[in-house]
Image: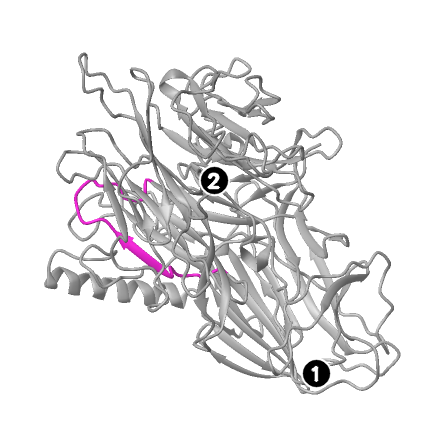
Amino acid sequence: MKAPSIHGRNPAVILASEPDQAELTVACQNRSRLRLAQTVTCALLFFAAARQTPANAGNVGDSASASGGAKQEETAAISAQIQQSEYEIHWQSAAGAYMAPNRAHNLRFTFHDDGLTITPREAVQNQSPWAATMRLASYGRLGYPVRRIGVAAWAVAGNTAHDNAGGITIDYKNDSSGLRQDFLIRERPPGSGPLRLEFGLNASGANITFDPAQNAMYLTIAQKPSKVIMRYRDLHVFDSERMPLKARMEQVCPGRFAIVVDDAEARYPVLIDPTLENDGYLQDPQAGSLFGQSVAYVAEVYFTAGGTGEYGNHLGVAVGAPYFDSGSVPNAGAVYYYDAGWDGSLSTTPTWSYAGGGSNEFLGWSVADGGANNSIGGIAYHNILVGAPGFSHEQTNEGAAMAFYYDSNAASYPSSPSWIYYGGNAGENFGWSVAGNVDFAGSGSAGVIVGAPYFTNWLAPYYPIGQVRVFSGSTSGYSNTPAWTGYGESFSEFGYSVDWGNVQGTGPGTYPALLVGAPGASAVYEFLNPSGALNTSADATLTGSGRFGSAIASRQDQNGDGYHDLLVGDPNATYDSMAEAGMAYLFRGGSSGLSTTAAWSLGGDGTNANFGASVALGDMNGDGLADIIIGEPNMSTTSQGLTQNGYVDFYLTDFNTYLPDYEATIEGQFSGVQMGTSVAYAPSLVYQDADIIAGAPGADASTSPSVAVMKWP
């Protein structure tokens, strides 16, 4: 069974009919209730990234000279003005309406007094024209006279519009993150029962589907497979005191839906805050920086909410750009952090960033959630862990790993590393891989794992064997002395990928195991941890062909048996007679550790697709079973004339067979973007829903997306 493919290339639209009824209709059956204080938003959330310049000399955006910096600032200012103008709302006499383009999502909006129509900004190859309109038909309560939108008074400024229609105001903001549409109801409508806003929907060239079980509306284009181009779901409703109100979305009948709000205890005015977004992305801040080469979910980051002194649970996304040029310094690399704030929305600009200071450091080649080891005031702050495998300190290309501890006083991450460790040996590329948030010893503080796949043996014949080091954590940070060091065989690339998992179970007296990929030996090594001290020799070796072990992911229970499982990528494997199509394998955990026989395997979609170049595990639909995410960055959609646009394939675990079942594919928009070079699972990110984070580092900074954040379903 294959569900609709998801493509970042094509934006979404909503359409609507304009019914004329004396009072609100009764809702259709199969209503389902929405969670408290959520936002109406599309399932695919993408955001453009603007550059942020920290204060220190090693930070993003530094220039070689004052005059060069002034020119760059002038150029950046002009560019920013041009980009901003691409989202401005203007009156179009020929259409007799206000209109606005949205370049980031290839959308064009036409505004009406009671809603809007959306069409593609430009025609898309191999896609039929479509249009969609959504109009607010009426608002009030069942059984009582309802109110309708009349002639509105418009106030437009830049990319914002204010539609004053009597007792209700509709505000719009159009930017690279999508179109925000807020409804402000100033006075309580008469009568009893919940508040209802009824909308008419109509679409041409697209199909509208409601999913009552998920409180979602989908817009799809009829093709094979059908393509979801928009999701409209969740609700975020507040009263005048910013108290969240219970709300739900329900289908009334074909072409008509309602937002239903429990306003019995609300103080008016009431704000209903839907966001109309669809395919969009985090944008590369600099052409050729490989923004999205690495991505990671960062959990439990706490910031003050709007200066009120109240803390909110913040989650976020870290993105590496290892080829970022810091001023005149080539390939210094950079890391960016995007915060999902207290209201659940992901920042459209970097909350924090840091760039390398030396040539060819490739900082950001790897990024990870470093876990919490510096609890401040009883609040656990997670660190950002970054690898810079080209860093040269005392030895050329020895590499470095660094961590940034959250500063509660500054309410941000620092402008220089809080912890840094250098490889110490020329050419070892320490920091090629990193993993964090692991407590091997049961101390209560998170430690980190760092791989150096090209570490060379100190004894003749001096072959590169690879090395992995583990650093314990404490309440003051990571140790400067490795707690464990392991080595591979000659040319094994031991440490090319690293992770950990509770493969022997998560109960009392169990500890996580260390997992190390060595694609030069087509192997993954398992080091068990029976008593809080990692074994010095591998307890099991999983083997394959090609470059088996290039990517690994664990920390999740895929079949619900209480043991973490392991997903392994082999991007150079031959599959179904297709050279380097790539493969991925699933190995199950158990009381004695990982099985050495794969429970499931699958190959790529085409020659040189490199399926398995990136892998992730995580429960995307809330059924308690981890689902599977696999990147194949060099897959080409030849039917659309695209080469190496890349795919991310998503598989839901079947609750009956406990095996992965194909669900959807995210495709890169343009040739060469290599969507799926990196993937990560975010268990609770945008509006506290699970997301897939996918990197497309080959994207062009000016026109093409680089990182996708996909909510499912």
Q: Residue at x 12, y 37 (%)?
A: 394
Q: Which residues are magenta?
A: 346-365
Q: Would you say 238 lies left or right of 281 here?
A: right
| Looking at the image, residue 464 lies above or below residue 620 | above
Mark whose residue sits in front, 2 or 1: 2
> Measured along the vertical axis of the image, is residue 256 above or below residue 460?
below
Instruction: Tell me if residue 522 comes above or below residue 168 in the rendering.
Output: above
Task: Verify CB contact (< 8 Å) between mark 2 and mark 1.
Answer: no
Task: State the SS at label 2.
Answer: strand
Label 1: few (<14), some or many (≥20) within 10 Å? few
Residue depicted at 25% across the width and 52% down the height: 355
State yes or no: residue 354 in magenta: yes
**Disc 1 marks which amino acid?**
Gly
Total tally of numbered discs in the picture: 2
Q: Position of residue 672 (x, y in %)?
A: 39, 36
**In this view of the protein, which residue sits in the foreground, 383 or 341?**
383
- Which residue is under mark 2? 679
Whichever of labels 2 and 1 marks the residue nearer the N terminus, that label is 1
Q: Quadrant of residue 503?
A: top right
Q: Is residue 443 visible?
A: yes
Q: Main secondary structure of the magenta part?
A: loop
- Residue 301 coordinates in the image, percent (x, y): 45, 59
* Residue at image coords 13%, 60%: 68
The residue where tag 1 is placed is 150
Q: Secondary structure at mark 1?
A: loop
How far is disc 2 from disc 1 in space, using C-alphas? Answer: 48 Å
Q: Residue at x 82, y 78 (%)?
A: 141
Q: Amino acid at mark 2?
A: Val
